[in-house]
Image: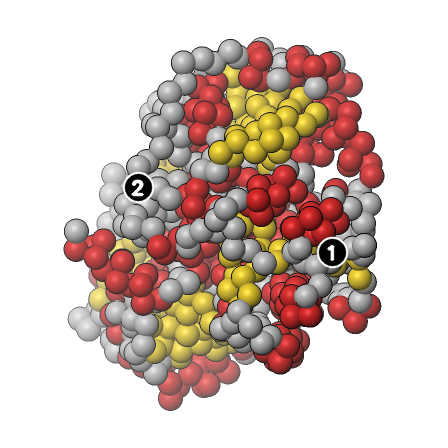
């Protein structure tokens, strides 16, 4: 299995707040005084560095001209705006950390609306006592995630809460993206005959978090699939409004995403269990823990529901990309069983795949 | 004399083979070719019920065969009094209450353990009772209680946790014990005047621990074939085939379909742990009633680890929902969809009875896997309108 690129924290960039000054985040780091200023300027500004952030306004001021210069037809485009909060525990897990997840997650929420992410905001809620070194690692990986997606972190906020009133660090990110002319993504556009394409294997993220949290060990480490899905958007923009729906099946997994769409669009779906790829180790972990991988979170997968006549072309485009090399057409939209997802099982029978009730795993993102 | 038949042809090797479509169709055809009359077969274990629903195995069976879902859902049969006791103990400030996940959502008379957690109670989900022992070791100022629920399958690990706590001198660990045993439940079902079960798929994992020698006298006394069966779709189809073959020729024997895991004598080391820590006791089964000698309790020499003795919870007044027919569902008398509250007042989000909560509960299986699609939609739309 290919290991994900990891940032080398040991060389090059070392934390600008030396251990001898402060080893841990203190309440005063969020108090607005000297320590706050030091934290913001040394850790955040130095890494997130861009012309909008560096203005240091209370709000980021974003000239429309900059979008024009980036090649968007501002008059004919639409803005997408999203927000999400990240409370994953543990904050460092195989394949990533909370910072990377917070950037990728918001980027992906924009991507699946058909938007090219451009700006994001970051709000940190830090529990007193967090190691500055850990915060530094988180900041570096956020910087790297933003670079990979081509987004700028243009505004932010930091609060520190008393020890015991948080859980190390929570991060909120909001994002703005631009939807190009001709793209029209909406669950309501899903219609019978459409094909359902999944960009790769499922359940890696949830099980990676679970094994880190519960100390489960497998022969091969299961790593989170956290990744920005921007490459998968870039190669399908040309299909325009033939792309009807996109989703990233995060919390609640593939099953919940498909159910949501089926319910909103009032259509049925028939998926094929044999086409849904799951890593053997993940399958094994799910067997042991009594979990159903269809409901386990992903952080780097995309579902696209598209017109039948472009499904094969899109599949080919995705399979040429690293993130989509295991893509499959997993099923189709039907007029029967509206509001319901039905799966053809490996033994050839059919069953309903229901919406999950409650949480299979708490705090996975 | 009843004897065990072992058929090498029924052995398979890898998990994927047990979910193979071709093998399933072959078995389905074989069952259809053998069956000549209607037969009612009970799968004891809730894990098997879930596989049957998850893979829609009934689609592959001839209409002569009716599967009746058994009481093998430990969470479902845990008495209400004990859940109320657990809730009462979990509310104490000096307690960290630990449990497997399923148990947390099982409704007590008034609320469940998750709502105790939401109100500030220290309730933790663990994956092994040994994790609870570790929590006790790390929190010497607290009493750590583990909710020891389950059949013969989970009992050895729970026994081990008590032995381990004793060995390490951990005095702040105890278990709230409600273990139940399968063979007495089978006998209770067979001797009931409502009995309509003609053959059993015995629970493979229970037999992995206990072996299947206990089943020979039952098969002989009640004239029922008992086939020790695994949990994958192919296992279950094979188990059904073996049962039907016996029924059709009037045989009543114990057979082992799950021979890749189960031996006749079972896991001797696990049984030794059970003997060391537990003794048999009469046990009340939720929805079913008292079954003689159908449970384990801690032996007197381990009473220091018995949460019921440490926390003397009294004045428990239990109150079951009058709408819930869990008892009849657990005895196989009614199917979940025959319940008037199914999918309406009772859903996995707002369960009235335990079978709607547990991953092994029949009601939850029917709800999740949409056993009767039409009915479910009617129910869902009615629920929306009301």
Which residue corresponds to the image point at 30% horizontal and 78% vertical from the top-left? A335
Q: Is residue A9 above or below residue B52?
A: above
Q: Where does residue B65 sit, x and y in percent of width and height?
A: 53, 68
Which residue corresponds to the image point at 29% horizontal and 71% vertical from the top-left? A338
Q: Which is nearer the N-term, disc 2 or disc 1?
A: 1
Comparing A290 with A315, the one in front is A290
Please check whether the numbered discs 2 and 1 fall on a single chain: yes
Kindly identify which residue carries mark 2: B323
* Chain of residue at mark 1: B
Q: Is residue A28 above or below residue A340?
A: above
Label annotation for residue B351: none
Which residue corresponds to the image point at 52% horizontal and 24% vertical from the top-left? B97
Q: Residue furthest bottom?
A: A309
Q: Where does residue B122 sit, x and y in percent of width and height?
A: 47, 23
Comparing B213 with B372, the one in front is B213
Which residue corresponds to the image point at 59% horizontal and 51% vertical from the top-left? B44
Q: Is residue A148 left or right of residue B302?
A: left
Q: Residues within 10 Å of mark 1 (few under 14, many from 20)?
A: many
Comparing B43 with A344, the one in front is B43
Residue B307: image quadrant is top right
* Chain of residue at mark 2: B
Kindly identify which residue carries mark 1: B254
Quadrant location of the N terminus of chain A in the rendered image = bottom right
Q: Where does residue B329 sit, x and y in percent of width and height?
A: 44, 48
Q: In this view, does B209 lie to the left or right of B190?
A: right
Any part of residue B352 in sight: yes
Q: How crowded is mark 2: few (under 14 residues within 10 Å), some or many (20 or more)?
A: some
Label 2: state its secondary structure.
loop
Residue B301: image quadrant is top right
Q: For marks 2 and 1, give the CA distance.
A: 38 Å
């Amino acid at each position: 299995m290919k290991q994900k690129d990891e940032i080398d924290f040991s060389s090059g960039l070392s934390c600008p707040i030396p251990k001898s000054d402060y080893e841990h985040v203190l309440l005063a780091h969020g108090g607005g005084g000297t320590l706050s200023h030091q934290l913001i300027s040394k850790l955040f500004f130095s890494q997130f560095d861009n012309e909008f952030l560096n203005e240091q306004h209370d709000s980021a001021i974003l000239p429309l001209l900059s979008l024009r210069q980036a090649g968007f037809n501002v008059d004919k485009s639409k803005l997408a705006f999203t927000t999400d909060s990240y409370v994953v525990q543990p904050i460092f897990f195989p394949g990533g950390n909370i910072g990377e997840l917070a950037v990728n997650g918001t980027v992906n929420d924009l991507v699946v609306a058909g938007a090219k992410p451009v700006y994001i905001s970051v709000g940190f809620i830090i529990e007193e006592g967090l190691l500055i070194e850990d915060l530094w690692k988180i900041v570096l990986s956020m910087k790297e995630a933003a670079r990979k997606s081509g987004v700028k972190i243009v505004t932010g906020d930091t609060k520190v809460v008393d020890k015991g009133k948080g859980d190390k660090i929570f991060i909120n990110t909001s994002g703005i993206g631009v939807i190009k002319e001709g793209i029209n993504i909406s669950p309501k556009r899903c219609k019978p005959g459409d094909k359902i394409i999944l960009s790769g294997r499922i359940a890696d993220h949830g099980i990676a978090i679970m094994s880190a949290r519960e100390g489960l060990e497998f022969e091969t480490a299961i790593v989170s699939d956290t990744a920005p899905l921007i490459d998968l958007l870039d190669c399908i923009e040309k299909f325009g409004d033939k792309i009807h729906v996109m989703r990233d099946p995060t919390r609640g997994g593939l099953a919940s995403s498909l159910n949501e769409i089926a319910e909103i669009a009032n259509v049925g779906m028939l998926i094929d269990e044999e086409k849904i790829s799951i890593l053997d180790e993940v399958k094994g972990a799910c067997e042991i823990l009594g979990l159903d991988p269809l409901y386990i979170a992903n952080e780097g997968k995309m579902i696209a529901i598209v017109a039948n006549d472009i499904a094969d072309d899109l599949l080919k485009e995705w399979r040429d990309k690293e993130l989509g090399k295991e893509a499959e057409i997993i099923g189709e939209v039907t007029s029967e069983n509206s509001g319901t997802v039905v799966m053809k099982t490996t033994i050839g029978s059919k069953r309903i795949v229901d919406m999950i009730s409650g949480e299979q795993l708490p705090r996975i993102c | 004399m009843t004897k065990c038949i072992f058929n090498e042809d029924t052995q398979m090797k890898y998990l994927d083979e047990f979910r193979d479509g071709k093998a399933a169709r072959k078995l389905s055809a074989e069952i259809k070719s053998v069956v000549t009359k209607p037969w009612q077969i009970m799968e004891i274990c809730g894990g098997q019920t879930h596989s049957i629903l998850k893979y829609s195995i009934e689609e592959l069976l001839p209409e002569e065969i009716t599967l009746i879902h058994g009481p093998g859902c430990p969470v479902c049969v845990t008495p209400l009094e004990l859940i109320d006791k657990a809730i009462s103990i979990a509310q104490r400030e000096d307690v960290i209450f630990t449990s497997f996940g399923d148990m947390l959502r099982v409704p007590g008379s008034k609320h469940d353990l998750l709502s105790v957690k939401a109100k500030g109670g220290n309730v933790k989900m663990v994956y092994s009772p040994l994790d609870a022992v570790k929590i006790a070791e790390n929190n010497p100022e607290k009493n750590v209680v583990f909710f020891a629920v389950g059949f013969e399958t989970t009992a050895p690990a729970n026994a081990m946790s008590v032995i381990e706590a004793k060995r390490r001198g951990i005095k702040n660990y105890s278990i709230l014990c409600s273990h139940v045993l399968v063979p007495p439940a089978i006998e209770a079902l067979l001797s009931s005047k409502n009995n309509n079960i003609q053959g059993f798929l015995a629970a493979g994992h229970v037999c992995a621990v206990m072996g299947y020698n206990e089943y020979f006298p039952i098969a002989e006394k009640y004239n029922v074939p008992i086939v020790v069966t695994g949990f994958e779709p192919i296992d279950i189809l094979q188990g059904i085939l073996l049962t039907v073959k016996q029924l059709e020729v009037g045989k009543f024997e114990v057979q082992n379909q799950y021979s890749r895991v189960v031996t006749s004598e079972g896991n001797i080391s696990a049984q030794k742990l059970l003997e060391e820590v537990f003794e048999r006791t009469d046990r009340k089964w939720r929805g079913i009633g008292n079954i003689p000698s159908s449970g384990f309790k801690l032996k007197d020499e381990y009473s220091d680890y018995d949460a019921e003795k440490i926390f003397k919870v009294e004045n428990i007044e239990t109150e079951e929902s009058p709408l819930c027919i869990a008892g009849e569902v657990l005895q196989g008398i009614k199917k979940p969809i025959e319940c008037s509250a199914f999918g309406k007042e009772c859903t996995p989000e707002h369960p009235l009875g335990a079978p709607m909560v547990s991953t092994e509960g029949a009601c939850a299986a029917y709800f999740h896997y949409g056993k009767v699609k039409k009915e479910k939609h009617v129910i869902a739309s009615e629920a929306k309108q009301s």
